[in-house]
Amino acid sequence: MAMPDSLASLHVPPVGDNAILCVGLRLEGDAQDWITASLPFVTRDERERAGRFIHAADAARHMVGRALARRCLEAALNRPVPEAFSVTRWGKPQLEDTDVDFSISHSGGMVWTALCRSCHVGIDVEEIRPVPELEVLAAALHPHEQAGVFAVPEEERLRIFYRCWTRKEAVLKAAGTGLNMTMDSFQVCTDRKTDAWLISLPPDDTPETGDSEGSGCWTVRDINTEAAYHCSMAACAPQLDVAVFRLPDAAPVTEQI
């Protein structure tokens, strides 16, 4: 398991010109320890925002997400990154005047970030938890995705739903719109394939990609993580290399996909 001092000792490879780097860790132990470990790598505004969370675990996820992204950006840019992140008009964090795009996601005890020089990137991780009104949430999906969720036995539907949801969230983050774009305006596969699962993009222009980008012009992958989670990544350029870098029990390891 990753420990809070992992943030200070983190060493990651630089982001290549035609590659995506995905870095994740699991928050084990006391949330306050993670908050303390994040302090050197977050801004005053980020600390103040974290202070408004009611639960320490929520504050820890917020701060570790920013700290992890900043540490990875430092490696990519080969310089300290003390400045605050700005946000796009759709709310996606960004570091101005750089050629590195990044995305942050956290859920439960998992925190992930993805970085790319070639194009815009999105990553999403979700803890697989019971959904009391699955039919209501699934109604927001593309009709074919809804059919895929409910075509399987009831005990499998929750995992299929989260698989679909994280894939769509990753695409929306890469497109730069977040949930300002409707979930039913594009389609992903709901099956177990771990790449090439993007079937169609929204028909209208998106802020980052324009209408000339088809689904085949993207790199999309599922990220192997713990059984209780699903994690997906999407980037607006084709055939990019994907490297996954995790903080397990002792030291970071790199996994090429």
Image (tube, rainbow, N blue to C red):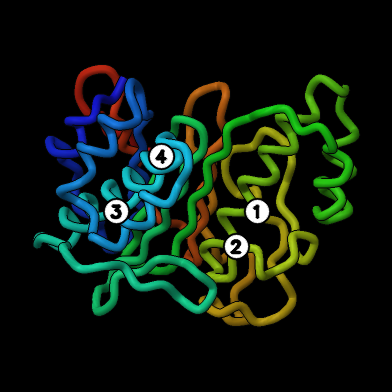
Whether label 1 touches label 2, CB < 8 Å: yes
Q: Left or right? Give the position of 19 relative to 239.
A: left
Whether label 2 touches label 3, CB < 8 Å: no
Circle 4 or circle 2, nearest the eye: 4
Report how far apart the C-alphas of labels 1 and 3 lie in the structure. 30 Å
Secondary structure of residue under mark 2? helix
Q: Which residue is mark 1?
A: 168
Which circle marks residue 111 in the picture? 4
**Circle 2: residue type:** Leu
Location of the C terminus (image quadrant): top left
Report how far apart the C-alphas of labels 4 and 2 lie in the structure. 18 Å
Of mark 4 and mark 1, the one earlier in the sequence is 4
Report how far apart the C-alphas of labels 2 and 3 lie in the structure. 27 Å
Q: Left or right? Give the position of 165 relative to 72.
A: right
**Circle 4: residue type:** Val
**Circle 1: residue type:** Lys
Which circle marks residue 145 in the picture? none
Residue at horizontal 61%, vertical 54%?
169
Residue 208 spot, x, y in % from top left:
51, 77
Circle 4 or circle 1, nearest the eye: 4
Residue 130 spot, x, y in % from top left:
73, 27
Which circle marks residue 172 in the picture? 2
Secondary structure of residue under mark 4? strand
Q: Which residue is mark 3?
A: 47
**Circle 3: residue type:** Arg
